[in-house]
Image: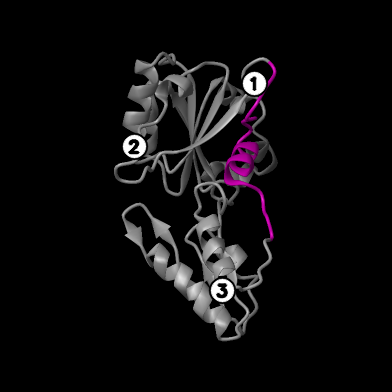
């Protein structure tokens, strides 16, 4: 039994053994094929039926991916499990886009945040996030790009800070848009999803070290770079 997310590419799904049953358990903004509690219940129920269960997740299950919650349910039911880690979305997508998350001259720290807060959750610490010489990697930040931009600028981050929106990171049709923090909402509106938002001076290095475009000229035509200054 393979429970997979929308983030898992068709190429990866093709690697699944042919006799396995596939169940889509993906989520997009405003579109959930299965509630989280049902996913947790199904993982436990299928395992208790004696089936071999694979939970196939893209992005990063343990960075805003709710993988921890799923394993809590499995562990509470006394079911043994094994985690096979991959490359986190922020590291993979930015590396493929030629954007180092840290750089001695530009950023000495990296902060992973989510742009999708629970209803009633505490507000972000915008003062801390607006400090310079750090990179922000924002998961699920496209929907609230306008708020993210305005809050960071209001709390002191320069409106001209480089920003990028990376859609379908590490896939053959990866799409990278770069611009400035004040133009982030415009970038987000044009971004195919799933997408990762990156804010910081390191984004400016994209045009120098875009390995993806250099090594894949055909793909570069599909993975266009749009610059909004």
Residue sitting at x 44%, y 16%: 157
Q: Are marks 3 and 2 in contact (CB under 8 Å)?
A: no
SS for dot 3: strand
Decide: is 163 above or below 22: above
Q: Which mark is residue 2?
A: 3
* Picture quarter with the C terminus: top left
Q: Which mark is residue 59?
A: none
Disc 2 crowd, CA 10 A, few/some/many (<14, 14-19, 20+): some
Disc 3 crowd, CA 10 A, few/some/many (<14, 14-19, 20+): some
The residue that mark 2 highlights is 144
SS for dot 1: loop
Decide: is 215 above or below 84: above
> How far separated are the C-alphas under marks 3 and 2?
32 Å
Disc 1 crowd, CA 10 A, few/some/many (<14, 14-19, 20+): few
> How far separated are the C-alphas under marks 1 and 2?
26 Å
Residue extent of the magenta highlight? 84-104
The residue that mark 1 highlights is 108
């Amino acid at each position: 039994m393979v429970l997979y997310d929308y983030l898992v590419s068709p190429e990866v799904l093709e690697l699944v053994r042919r006799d396995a049953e596939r169940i889509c358990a993906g989520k997009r903004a405003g579109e959930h094929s299965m509630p989280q509690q049902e996913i947790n219940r199904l993982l436990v129920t299928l395992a208790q039926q004696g089936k071999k269960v694979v939970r196939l997740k893209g992005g990063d299950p343990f960075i805003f991916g709710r993988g921890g919650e799923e394993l809590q349910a499995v562990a509470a039911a006394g079911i043994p499990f094994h985690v096979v880690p991959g490359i986190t979305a922020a590291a993979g997508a930015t590396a493929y886009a030629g954007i180092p998350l840290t750089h001695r001259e530009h950023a000495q720290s990296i902060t992973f945040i989510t742009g999708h807060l629970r209803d009633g959750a505490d507000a972000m610490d915008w003062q801390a996030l607006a400090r310079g010489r750090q990179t922000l990697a924002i998961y699920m930040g496209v929907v609230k790009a306008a708020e993210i931009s305005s809050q960071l600028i209001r709390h002191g981050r320069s409106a001209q800070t480089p920003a990028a929106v990376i859609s379908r990171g590490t896939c053959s049709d990866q799409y990278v848009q770069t611009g400035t923090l004040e133009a982030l909402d415009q970038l987000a509106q044009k971004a195919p999803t799933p997408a990762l938002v990156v804010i910081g001076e390191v984004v400016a290095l994209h045009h120098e070290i875009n390995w993806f475009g250099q090594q894949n000229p055909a793909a570069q035509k599909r993975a266009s770079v749009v610059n909004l200054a």
